[in-house]
Structures are given as C-alpha cells and as structure tokens.
Image (cartoon, rainbow, N blue to C red):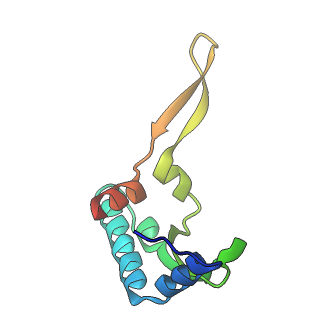
Amino acid sequence: MDYFAHRGAMSHVARMCGESSAMDVAAERLKSGVQREAASSIETSAFINSINVDERPTPLGNNKGVRDRTVYSSDPGAYWIEYGRSDRVVGENGEEGLSHSGGHYHFAQAIRKLG
C-alpha cells in the first residue's frame, strides 16, 4: 500500500469532519445519553438542564479552524458530581483522615454506552 501525506493533510481532513452534520448528531446523542444517565440518580433537574453542546474552532496548533463539539455541564458542582470528592474529617479520637464520596460518572457511562 502506498502512503502519501502532504503538509496539512490531517488538518484538512479534520476540518472536513468538523463541517459534517454527523458530528452534530454524535454530540447530541452524547448529550442525551448523559442526561439519561443523570436522570437515574440526580434528585433535581438543575444538573440535567445544565448539560449542553458547544461548538467552537480549535484554538491551538496546526488544526486552527477545525470545528470541535464539546458536551459539558455548566453546573458549578459538575466536577464533584462526575468524580466525587474527598473531605478532611476528624475522628472521635482526634485523628485526621479523608472521607471520599464516589462520583456518579454520568459522562463516562454515556460515552461507554455509545460505544
């Protein structure tokens, strides 16, 4: 098999993919998947309603001008909802330690299920 690559070929292909409506469809599917995952364990709709899709050009490197899609949550607690948190605690005997509450991994679960 012959391999031919010219300078800028990958950026050109990335720009072509970024213009594709299939990328919009994939981002919306992921957004819906995250919302579905969150609906099973979140008590309020604030987190679910904070999940959005953003489109912007890639700002770095040779891929400037590539339209990327980002699925994200604007909820201030999104990081802790996804990954959990550790709190410093002091036990009855005065010893300090950490207490970890696990995350829900809504984004990770949705990505896994999209396959």
* Front in this rendered view, residue 68 or 31: 68
Image coords of residue 71 (percent x, y): 48, 71
Q: Quadrant of the C terminus?
A: bottom left
Q: Residue at x 64, y 77 (%)?
A: 63
Q: Is residue 82 above or below residue 69?
A: above
> Residue extending furthest front?
2
Picture quadrant where residue 57 is located = bottom right
Picture quadrant where residue 74 is located = bottom right
Q: Residue at x 50, y 84 (%)?
A: 18
Q: Residue at x 52, y 81 (%)?
A: 13
* Front in this rendered view, residue 63 or 10: 10
How many marks overall? Answer: 0
Image coords of residue 58 (percent x, y): 64, 77
Image coords of residue 53 (percent x, y): 48, 78
Using residue 69 as the reference point, say whether residue 66 is left or right of it: right
Q: Is residue 48 visible?
A: yes
Picture quadrant where residue 42 is located = bottom left
Q: Quadrant of the N terminus?
A: bottom left
Q: Is residue 60 visible?
A: no
Q: Is residue 2 above or below residue 67?
A: above
Q: Is residue 66 above or below residue 97?
A: below
* Front in this rendered view, residue 71 or 16: 16
Image coords of residue 93 (percent x, y): 59, 10
Q: Residue at x 58, y 27 (%)?
A: 98
* Front in this rendered view, residue 45 or 4: 4
Using residue 92 as the reference point, say whether residue 49 is left or right of it: left
